[in-house]
Image (cartoon, rainbow, N blue to C red):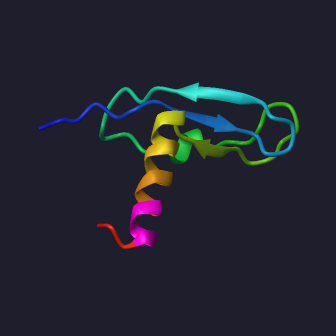
Amino acid sequence: MPVQPKPYKLVCPKCGFTKIVTPKSDASTMIEDLSSCPKCEVRMEIKYSDWEEKKMKIYLKILTLGLF
C-alpha cells in the first residue's frame, strides 16, 4: 500500500537558503533533492518539520531517562 511521504525542508548550512520539497511518490528517492545551494554551492541539509524535530527530542529524552 502506498504511503504519502511527508514534506521536508532543505537548508543551506552556510547562507540559510531554504527549499521545501514535497515528494510526489513514496518510490522516489531524496538523492536528486540533495543538491547544492543555488547561492553558494554548498550541499544542502535535510531539516524536517518542527513537530518532527520536537517529537524526536521527546523520544530521545524518554529513552535516556529509561522510561520506555
The residue that appears at 50% across and 53% down in the rendered structure is 57
User: Looking at the picture, how far across and down is residue 59, in whole percent?
Assistant: 40, 56
> Quarter of the image holding residue 35?
top right
The residue that appears at 28% across and 31% down in the rendered structure is 4
Above or below — where is 37 with respect to 58? Answer: above
User: Looking at the picture, how far across and down is residue 14, in whole percent?
Assistant: 86, 44
Closer-to-camera residue (13/53): 53
> Quarter of the image holding residue 12?
top right
Closer-to-camera residue (26/57): 57
Q: From the viewer's perspective, tell me whether residue 18 is left or right of residue 68.
A: right
Q: Provide the residue span drawn in magenta.
A: 61-65
What's the magenta bit mostly, secondary-structure-wise? helix
Which quadrant of the figure contains the C terminus? bottom left
User: Looking at the picture, how far across and down is residue 1, in whole percent?
Assistant: 11, 38
Q: From the viewer's perspective, tell me whether residue 67 is left or right of residue 58.
A: left
Image mark count: 0
Magenta segment: does it hold 67? Answer: no
The residue that appears at 46% across and 62% down in the rendered structure is 60
The residue that appears at 42% across and 30% down in the rendered structure is 23
Closer-to-camera residue (12/31): 12
User: Looking at the picture, how far across and down is residue 24, in whole percent?
Assistant: 37, 26
Q: From the viewer's perspective, tell me whether residue 8 is left or right of residue 62.
A: right
Magenta segment: does it hold 63? Answer: yes
